[in-house]
Amino acid sequence: MVSAMQEHAGHHGEAGHAHPHPPPAKDEKIHSYYQVLGLAIKELLVEKGIVTPEEIRKAIEFRDSITPARGATIVARAWTDPAYKQRLLKNGTEAIRDFGLDMGGTQLVVVENTPAVHNMIVCTLCSCYPRAVLGLPPSWYKSREYRSRTVREPRAVLREFGTEIPAPVELRVHDSTADMRYLVLPMRPEGTERLGAEQLAGLVTRDCMIGVAVPQNR
């Protein structure tokens, strides 16, 4: 697979939906239709007094401040609090409100990895992603190759991420939509019984919550 799918550092490109973006630098050329459309909408909203440039700036700063660490904290709590885990699996949208997170107009569905089932997330149409929990999606998640191959040959894709799922384990691929986002609740690694919630959260990476990796006991 091309290097885009191996960019675990997660460079941020354009999203497939209308999300606030900062204005381009003076020497930056605008090539994308969505960039032009986004800027036009922003200017119109400011002109009509619906929002101010300051409000837009703060919204962008807040969005950029969200990192996968938030999701890792949620996973760690689910690992250590059975009652919370059940709430999270039953209604992820409501359960993450305990952390001050809001999915807006979308629904969060949390799927649990077990010894018998491994879950993997994709958005085949664009880049729908649980941004309220994980922040901006990595560039490989938005790539056409990942979006198309994940539904056709998920085990091969996982192997390219260094994740080997045993043949007896059922592999479920969940396709995100405009009004529904998915988050993987990975299995807690063995030998972590004495670790606290903060230490457990340190074991959970963004890729674990997308399903292309599994937590490792360091």
Image (spheres, rainbow, N blue to C red):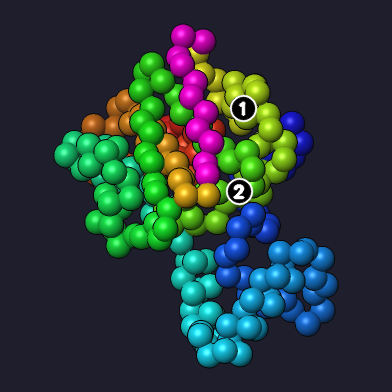
Residue occupying the far front of the picture: 48
Task: Name the residue at 40% across, 60% down.
Answer: 104
**Quadrant in the picture for residue 200:** top left
Q: Which class describes the residues within 10 Å of circle 2: few (<14), some (14-19), or many (20+)?
A: many
Q: Residue 172 in magenta? A: yes
Q: Is residue 90 left or right of residue 146?
A: left
Kindly identify which residue carries mark 2: 127
Residue occupying the far top of the picture: 168
Task: Name the residue at 70% across, 43% down.
Answer: 143
Q: Secondary structure at mark 2?
A: loop
Tell me which segment is drawn in magenta. Answer: 167-177
Kindly identify which residue carries mark 1: 151
Residue 6 in percent (x, y) is at: 67, 39
Q: Residue 52 in magenta? A: no
Residue 201 in percent (x, y) is at: 35, 46
Amino acid at circle 2: Ser
In the picture, the disc for residue 168 is none
Residue 40 in percent (x, y) is at: 69, 77
Question: In 3D space, how far apart are the residues under numbered discs 1 and 2 (Cα atoms)?
Answer: 15 Å
Residue 199 in percent (x, y) is at: 32, 45
Which quadrant of the rendered structure holds the N terminus? Answer: top right
Amino acid at circle 1: Val
Q: Is residue 84 visible?
A: yes
